[in-house]
Every structure is written in C-alpha cells, then in structure tokens.
Image (cartoon, helix red, strand yellow):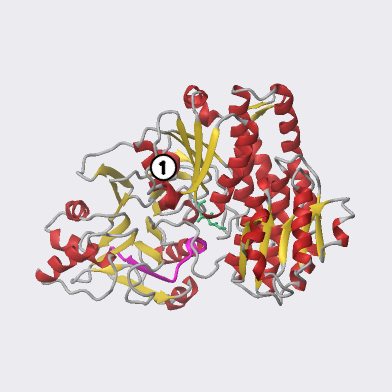
C-alpha cells in the first residue's frame, strides 16, 4: 500500500527519494510523487506521475535544481482515482507546504466543508489534501504547532511527512496507526513507512509510536507527543541486511524467496530448541509463560496467507496440546461478540505486523482480557509492539507480494509454540524429541523439492491452457490446498479454489469436467485413502488431476494425470514440504503467462486499510 520516504542531510536528495520509492514498490501502488527543496534559495522540485516510479524518475532532469531535503510517496488509491492530481505530495493554497500521508482521514468531508467555507481551494479527490489545508489554516509563525493543531482535529489514521518552504531544513513526521520509522545516519535523517526504503543508508532506527511526532532538522531530531511534550528515545539497531544484488540472480523476488526457505526454517529454529529435553525455548514468550499455562482456549487471527498458517496451527495445536483451538479471519473476528477471558489466548499472525484488520482484532481481544500474542516478521511493527508477548520469524524482508517463505516460517514457529505449550501440559519427552528431530530435517526435505523445480515448471507449462483450478486437501493439508489456490490466483489471475477434499461432493464436484483440473495434496498419512477416493471421483468425471504425493508411491501414478513427488516426513510437518511444489507451480504458471509476479495487480504487501 502507500509508502513514505523523506530525507534531510548533506546529500542530493532527489536520487535518494527515488531509490527509496523503488524500494517501496513491492508494497503495491498506482502513482508516485515527490517534493524536494533547496534551502538556500527555497527553490523546489514538485513532481508526480501515474504508474511506476520509473515514470516519475523520467521527469527528473539532470538540470533540475539541487535539493537538500524532501519527501516522497507511493500511493495506493483509496479516495479518488490514481491520477497525477490525486498523487501525493499534496499542497496548500500557497503552494509552499507539501505533505505525504498514509492512512485514512475519516472526518475529511466535514473538515473539507469547513475549510472551503474559510476560502481554501481544493483540487484533488483525496482525504489527504484536507490535512495540507488544515495545517495552512492553523499556521501562524510556528510550523510544529500548526501541524500539532491540525492532527488533533483529524479522526482516522495517519503516517505523515510534511515540509514548508518558509520553514527551511525542517521535516515533520507523525503517526497514528500507520508506521513511521526514522533512520539515523551520519549527519542525516531518512524516515520512511518501511525500513526497506532506507536500509542501505543506516540500520540505526527510531520507531515512532502512535500519537508521536518528530521534527527532523540539521543534525537534530526532536520527538514529542501531540501536545509537543518531548519524549526521549534511544535508536535501536536492526539486523536486516542491505544487498546490492537483491534478487541474487533469480528472475523474481518470489522465486528467490521460495528458494530461501531451507534457510528460513533454519533461522526460525536457531537457538530455539533444546534437543535433549524435547522442548522449545522462546525468549519472547518467557514473560507470559505462567499465563500461557493457564490458558483454556487459543485463537489464531490473521488474514490471507497468514490466515492459512493459523488454520494449519489449529490442526497442529489440537494434535500437540490439550487446548481448545480456533482460528478466524481477523476481519471477521473483530466484529464477533466473543466471550473472551483471561484464560483465552489470541495469537495475531502477520508478516508485516501492520495489517489493519489483524491489529483491530488483537485490540478487541485485549479489550476483553485475553492474552494477546504475536507471530510477526517485521521487527518493531505495530502488531509486535501491541501484543503482550510474541515470537519473531527472523526471516528477513519478504519483497514478493505473494507470501512464501514467511508462510513456512510461521508454520515452523507455530510448531515451536505448540511444542512449548504441549510439553508444559502433557506431551511426552519422546514426542517432543521426535518432533525436533524432524523439524531439523525440514531444510533438507525442502531442498529435495526445490531440486525438482524444472519438472514442476514443465507441469505448470502443460496446464497453461486451463483457466480454472480446484485445490483439495484434508486435515493438516487442507490449509495447504487453500494456500496453493491463493498463490495461483493472486499472481496468475487465474481462478483457483481451495476446498477441504471431503466437501467436494457437496457442491464443487459439479464444476468438474475435462476443462477444470484439480490439484490434490495426497501425501501418505491417515487421510491418504480418503484422498484417493476423492481423486477417483474426479477421474470418473473426466477431470484432470495433478497430485502432490509421497516419493515411492507407485499406485497414484496410475490414477492421476501428473504427480509431483515429495519426500516423506511426519504428518505434522508434511504440509510444510507439500506447500513448496504448489508455490513453484503457481510461480512458473504466472511466469509463463508473463504476469508481474512480484507486484500483482491490485495487491499490496502491507494492507493497512480495513
Ligand atoms: C498472500 C499474502 C497476503 C497476506 C495478508 C496478510 O500471498 O501475502 O494474503 O498474507 O495480506 O498480511 P500480513 O501477514 O502482513 O498480515
């Protein structure tokens, strides 16, 4: 979704802003813009374009003025179409103020009507433009005070950066519900809505909390609350690395991230298991271990791929612990009238840690007294901060919009949490040791599947003419079928539906014919025979079937049209091997179709609106 980057220091600002915008591209956007200022003569550069950042870059000319600070933005349209006028930065009636904004100003209509009455002229359809005029309306001789007053009048969410030509060498950033992170460089500050935008320059950061604002100026940063009361904050060092060759030779980030998964699993378990005792050790959960012991029910809340990780978690926790386990879409959970108590645990699962619905769900759970835990990848993100305790994926940035390595990482960590809880509540040491042994073999199993990528590519090519797919699986593999279907539809724009295999007879089977292939997750395990029956039912109706099956299974090759073989592990972990060929199938299918795999249309990496 929308992205913000701003810079103040001694370097030529525009190239830094453009590079930052490019690093935000993965989040999904439809237009971009920048405003940069030369503080000597207060000359400025104000550029906007629809489409890719490359379009904006084309507008930057060699003879453009040198600017020493500025702000920039990628916009994902909410209020008003993706046009140049609606792109950020927005300005006020004087044209001296420039402002970029992530989030939504909910009371913008009433504010706009008031401002129009006061003589302000609006040109865009956005909610953001209201903020620019509101600051102008409140501006006397103190820029910070005007921003503060304006922010106190708005309802909704914001991450903003604002500059004014009459107040040179000052950038004000502020947040409520939409992240702003300030990078501290050598005599320079570079703030953004996402660390990826500036990780090349510095790994020393300050996270703004809600209702905080910062004034970035020459060699100085002042953080205050929205009453301008100063807040002292020490910079934190983050361990994400910058790499020049970001794709490491892969055609897309998604493919790179699929191939990173053996490493992702290793990172998820490093230092987190005690082999001999068959238990995990999760430092982030230690402060709440006593409360966890007394939980009766655990509910996973999340969205999209993270929801499917939660669905897997439900089956997993039922197998390893004595808890009642539930899972819900965060966007639904937040509106249910749930009876939660201190014996409830709610686990918010999120790659970005910023997903608006997941955040709202966890706040609702907290309000009702539940213990709220987080399983998050982005360190310092809002969900990570607002949960009572949690575990990080430590998987590094995931740039491809379609989540792959984080799904596997989330599922591995769910195993570690289940193991911890299970071992505290009745799971035997033998079961614990067996699970750890197999988890440690997962990177090897995943590598075996990755080595078959060419064969999977051929299967994807063979099925290119088809426009509808059904994905089926049972029990622990049901979430994998759902995730496989999601991967295919989101990056190739082909219709794919995930279903529990047993439900097929209750409706979807009527879709089956020779033009509607099925991907069946049918590895060995206690539901295998039932899966074979479902596959036979499809074959009896002339449906084509691609099966993901266990190496050595000779029988299935005689029944289905194509088989992708995967190594065998224990039932609990088998889904984490089975998902790999489905990721690769979706990737190659979309690549053959020439789709924009890392940035699928209409999608955003971090969904910060509800
Ligand atoms: C799909 C995908 C999305 C996200 C969902 C939740 O490939 O990436 O469905 O899983 O938007 O995002 P997070 O995990 O950041 O809360």
Instruction: Check disc 1: other Cα within 10 Å, few if <14, some if 14-19, many if 20+.
Output: many
Is 102 on the left-hand or right-hand side of 347? left
Q: Is residue 573 above or below residue 157?
A: above
Q: Quadrant of residue 146?
A: bottom left
Seen at 22% across and 68% down, the residue is: 96
**Residue 50: percent from the left, percent from the top?**
42, 76
Mark 1 CB in 8 Å range of ligand 1? no
Residue with the mark numbered 1 = 362
Q: Secondary structure at mark 1?
A: helix
Q: How many marks?
A: 1
Q: Is residue 267 above or below residue 118?
A: above
Magenta segment includes 464: no
**Residue 501: percent from the left, percent from the top?**
68, 55
**Residue 284: percent from the left, percent from the top?**
51, 31
Q: The magenta stretch spans which residues?
A: 24-40
Residue closer to the observer: 509 or 394:
509
Seen at 35% across and 62% down, the residue is: 71
Report if residue 185 is visible in the image: no
Q: Quadrant of residue 483?
A: bottom right
Outermost residue, front side: 506
Residue closer to the observer: 34 or 293:
293
Magenta segment includes 26: yes
Q: Quadrant of residue 429?
A: top right
Seen at 30% across and 70% down, the residue is: 44
């Amino acid at each position: 979704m929308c992205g913000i980057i701003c810079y103040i220091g001694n370097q030529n600002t525009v190239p830094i802003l453009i590079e930052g915008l490019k690093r935000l591209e993965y989040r999904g956007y439809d237009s971009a813009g920048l405003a940069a200022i030369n503080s000597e003569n207060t000359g400025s550069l104000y550029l906007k374009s629809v489409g890719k950042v490359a379009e904006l870059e084309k507008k930057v000319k060699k003879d453009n003025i040198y600017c020493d600070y500025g702000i920039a933005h990628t916009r994902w349209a909410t209020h008003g179409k993706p046009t140049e006028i609606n792109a950020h930065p927005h300005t006020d009636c004087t044209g001296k103020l420039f402002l970029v904004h992530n989030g939504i100003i909910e009371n913008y209509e009433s504010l706009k009507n008031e401002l129009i009455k006061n003589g302000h002229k609006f040109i865009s359809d956005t909610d953001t433009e209201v903020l620019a005029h509101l600051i102008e309306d409140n501006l006397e001789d103190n820029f910070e005070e005007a921003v503060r007053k304006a922010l106190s009048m708005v309802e909704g969410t914001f991450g903003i950066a604002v500059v004014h030509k009459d107040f040179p060498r000052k950038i004000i950033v502020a947040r409520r519900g939409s992240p702003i992170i300030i990078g501290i460089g050598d005599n320079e500050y570079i703030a953004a809505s996402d660390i990826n935008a500036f990780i090349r320059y510095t790994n020393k950061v300050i996270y703004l909390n809600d209702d905080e604002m910062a004034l970035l100026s020459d060699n100085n940063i002042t953080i205050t609350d929205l009453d301008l009361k100063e807040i002292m904050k020490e910079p934190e060092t983050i361990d994400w690395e910058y790499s020049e060759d970001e794709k490491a030779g892969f055609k897309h980030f998604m493919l790179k991230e699929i191939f990173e998964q053996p490493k992702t699993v290793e990172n998820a378990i490093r230092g987190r298991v005690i082999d001999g005792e068959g238990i995990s050790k999760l430092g982030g959960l230690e402060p709440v271990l006593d409360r966890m012991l007394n939980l009766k029910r655990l509910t996973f809340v999340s969205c999209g791929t993270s929801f499917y990780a939660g669905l897997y978690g439900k089956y997993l926790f039922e197998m390893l612990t004595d808890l009642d386990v539930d899972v819900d879409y965060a966007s639904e959970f937040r509106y249910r009238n749930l009876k939660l108590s201190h014996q409830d645990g709610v686990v918010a699962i999120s790659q970005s840690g910023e997903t608006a619905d997941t955040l709202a769900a966890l706040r609702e759970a907290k309000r009702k007294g539940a213990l709220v835990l987080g399983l998050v990848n982005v360190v310092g993100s809002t969900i990570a901060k607002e949960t009572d305790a949690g575990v990080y994926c430590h998987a590094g940035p995931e740039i491809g919009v379609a989540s792959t390595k984080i799904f596997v990482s989330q599922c591995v960590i769910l195993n570690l949490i289940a193991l911890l809880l299970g071992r505290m509540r009745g799971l035997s040491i033998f079961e614990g040791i067996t699970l750890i042994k197999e988890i440690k073999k997962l990177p090897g199993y995943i590598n075996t599947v990755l080595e078959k990528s060419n064969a999977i590519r051929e299967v994807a090519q063979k099925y290119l003419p088809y426009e509808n797919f059904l994905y089926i699986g049972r029990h622990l593999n049901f979430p994998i079928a759902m995730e496989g279907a999601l991967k295919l539809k989101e990056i190739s724009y082909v219709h794919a539906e995930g279903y529990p295999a047993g439900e097929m007879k209750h409706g979807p089977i009527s879709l089956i014919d020779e033009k509607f292939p099925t991907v069946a997750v049918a590895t060995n395990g206690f539901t295998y025979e039932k899966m074979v029956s479902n596959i036979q039912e499809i074959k009896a109706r002339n449906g084509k079937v691609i099966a993901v099956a266990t190496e050595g299974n000779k029988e299935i090759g005689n029944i289905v049209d194509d088989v992708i073989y995967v190594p065998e592990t224990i039932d609990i972990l088998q889904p984490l091997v089975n998902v790999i060929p489905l990721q690769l199938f979706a990737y190659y299918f979309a690549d053959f179709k020439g789709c924009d795999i890392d940035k699928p249309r209409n999608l955003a990496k971090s969904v910060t609106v509800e």
